[in-house]
Amino acid sequence: MTATPPAAEEDIAKAVREHLAGAVDEVKFTRKGRMFIAARKETVKEVAIWLQGFGFDHTVAVSGVDHPTEKKIEALYFLSSYSREDLKRVVVSLSVQLDRENPSLPTLTPVWESANFFEREAYEMFGVNFEGHPNLQKLLLQDNWDGPPPLRKDLKIPEMA
């Protein structure tokens, strides 16, 4: 589903709210050119497909934030556009709150192939399992790493002897 190019940020946010009503919890511009969208695990793929069709055609990054006191991991997709002039200046932060004990969500590589390596990095660094990922294995850490995900806030680094 493609949409008519919006003229301004308010129009972009309005289009997202209208087309994704019920699938997202929040849509807002946090500052000029930066849109935040909070989706749920069960709707994130639907949201991603719509955003891709709207013109957000690639991932800039996939990362996470550890919220240990809330027992949540926040998965974040950063999206932009190569194809639409009016969207090139916009970066979307697509956020999904996950259970910290079992953080998992469907992979978005079928929507954006560019998410492949970024999801692997988030898997490795935050422990997020991307269900259905074509190659979810270590990317940056050495093969013998058996500790917890290194960007979790409760990681204890042993002292050097």
Image (cartoon, rainbow, N blue to C red):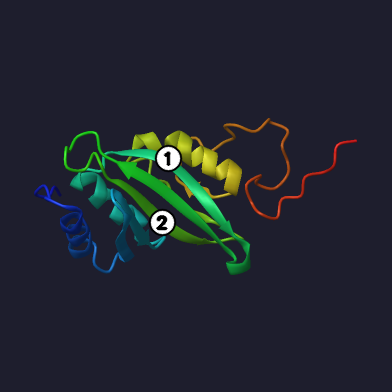
Label located before the other in sequence (2 or 1): 1
Residue at 45 percent across and 45 percent down: it is 132
Confirm whether residue 105 shows in the render. Answer: no
Confirm whether residue 12 shows in the render. Answer: yes
Measure the alpha-carbon separation of dots 2 and 1. Answer: 12 Å
Q: Quadrant of the C terminus?
A: top right
**Circle 2 SS class:** strand
Residue at 85 percent across and 42 percent down: it is 159
Looking at the image, which residue sits at the far right? 161
Asked which quadrant contains residue 12, the reply is: bottom left
Tags 2 and 1 in contact by the CB under 8 Å rule?
A: no
Rendered view: 124 above or below 66: above
**Circle 1 SS class:** strand
Rendered view: 145 above or below 14: above
Rendered view: 135 above or below 49: above
Residue that label 1 marks: 61
Residue that label 2 marks: 95
- Answer left or right for 158 relative to 128: right
Rendered view: 86 above or below 82: below
Q: Quick one: label 1, few (<14), some, or many (20+) residues within 10 Å? A: some
Q: Nearer the viewer, residue 111 or 19?
A: 19
Image coordinates for residue 98, horizontal then vertical, percent: 50, 61
